Amino acid sequence: MRKRTKKTKKIKKTRKIKKTNRVKKVKKIKKVNKIKSIKKAKIIRRVKMVNRVKRTKKLDAQDTVRQTKVRVIGIGGGGGSIISEIVSRVKKADFVAANTDLRALRAISKVKRFQFGQSLTQGLGTGMNTEIGETAAQNEKEKIKKLFENQDICIIIACLGGGTGSGSTPIFAKISKNLPCLTYGIFTMPFEFEGEKKMDIAKESLEKIRPHLNAFSIIPNERIFKIIDKNTPLKNALSAINERLADNLEGLIEMIYLPGLINIDFADLKTILSGRGRLTYLNTIEIEETGEEEAVGKVISSPLYSYTIKGARGILYNIVGGKALQLSKVSQISKLISDSVNKNAKIIFGINQNQKHKDKIKITLLATGCTMKSIKKPKPRPKPKPKPKPRPKPKPKPKPKPVPEPKPKPKPKPLPAEAPKAKAGKPKPKPKPKPRPKPSSQAPVLPIDGKVRRNALQVKKVIEEEEKELIEREKVWETPAIFRRKNNNKL
């Protein structure tokens, strides 16, 4: 009985174990199926969500306008250092540093780096040689062209006077001219203590750049002393200009991107910047709401520029204030700006309300077609004059031979008296005729109503007549005396 009970217990245990195993397997299968179904459901939901998002994006793309693409290109060491300081402040813009110096590019962060002229400079600078900077850019035109492609507006920043900035910037500008994007240049001029040669290089480069750009602004480094104290350290002084540039670019980009009560978009900017080589004024200021006149005075006369907005042909300005911004203040600001520019100027303005500018007014002003008297075209460098060829020494003129005085005419001697008739047997010997005088080769000078010289024909004629007379006389002497009388009688 005990053996049977033990067997039955074992059988029951095995049955229970098998049953539990079956149950566990079934539960596992159910769990797996549940998990699979849940995953499938999640995947289906995600797919549906993605499709919905795509549909909404397509609808939004049809309804909304494409965002304006802005690219800021800093050329050379100076341009690269400027954009490295303003990149953290200016949003919604793409920054590129272009240079031949690889070490200077590596020192810049948060921007795209573009090195060119590697085969020419071996990764070094140009050593203030503009020809090297120019050839380095010309050798890589296709790569430079890609920087301007698919962009709406490109802002070129360079410090003129060096080798890379002054040499390669005209090539960058020339390439951008053939592309549909707008190009706006911001250039700094050297300090006076840097010398006339560097200033001449900067002016020559500016003359090459300006016909290829839509607009350009000039900031002389000498104007820095009007915005800083004399005791300001060098690094802080140079950063002061960069801060002003950052404010101006930030205001320009906000003007395009931010929607407002009276909106300004890229089409308005394109209208103002249309044309070539226009001198441009860009300034942004922010002050308290109470000082409208002070704000306008500061915005139209920036200490950075050596020119103002007088004579400008196109004006684009934007006023940003809080939600409590009054219409009367907007009207007063607009009137002060319009009174300070040309009456025939094209004026476009915008108004934005932003809670960040509570109790403050921010004005950004862009003026094109300004005039400036101080910047003159550089004098052309004098070309070395070729050394004059040594003139051959003039040969001494032969002294005129003294004309010998003409010999006087020999007077004809009277014929001798006829001798008595000699005896027939003894004829007298013939007298030998005296030798005739040779006519002189020189023309005789005969006085005719004074001392007058004859010409060659007259002299020749006189000589021929003298010869005829002498020949006739000789004939007389040749005839014997016996026959002379007969001959005379016959005559």
Image (cartoon, grey):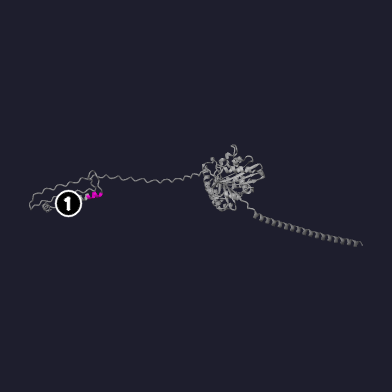
**The quadrant where residue 302 appears:** top right
Q: Nearer the viewer, residue 352 or 206?
A: 352
Residue 450, image x and y in percent?
A: 23, 43
Task: Pick out the residue farthest to the top.
Answer: 231
If the image is split into quadrants, where does the N terminus sit?
bottom right
Please state which of residues 150 and 340 is positioned toward the viewer in this rendering. Answer: 340
Q: Main secondary structure of the magenta part?
A: helix
Q: Does 382 appear in magenta?
A: no
Mark 1 Cα-neighbour bin, 10 Å: few <14, some 14–19, many ≥20: few
| In front of the other: 304 or 5 | 304
Image x and y of residue 394, in percent: 35, 45
Q: Secondary structure at mark 1?
A: helix
* Residue 366 seen in the figure: yes
Residue at image coords 85%, 61%: 15
Residue that carries the numbered disc 1 in the rendered image: 472
- 416 left or right of 204 in image: left
Magenta-drawn segment: 456-461
Residue 289 horizontal/vertical position (percent)? 64, 41
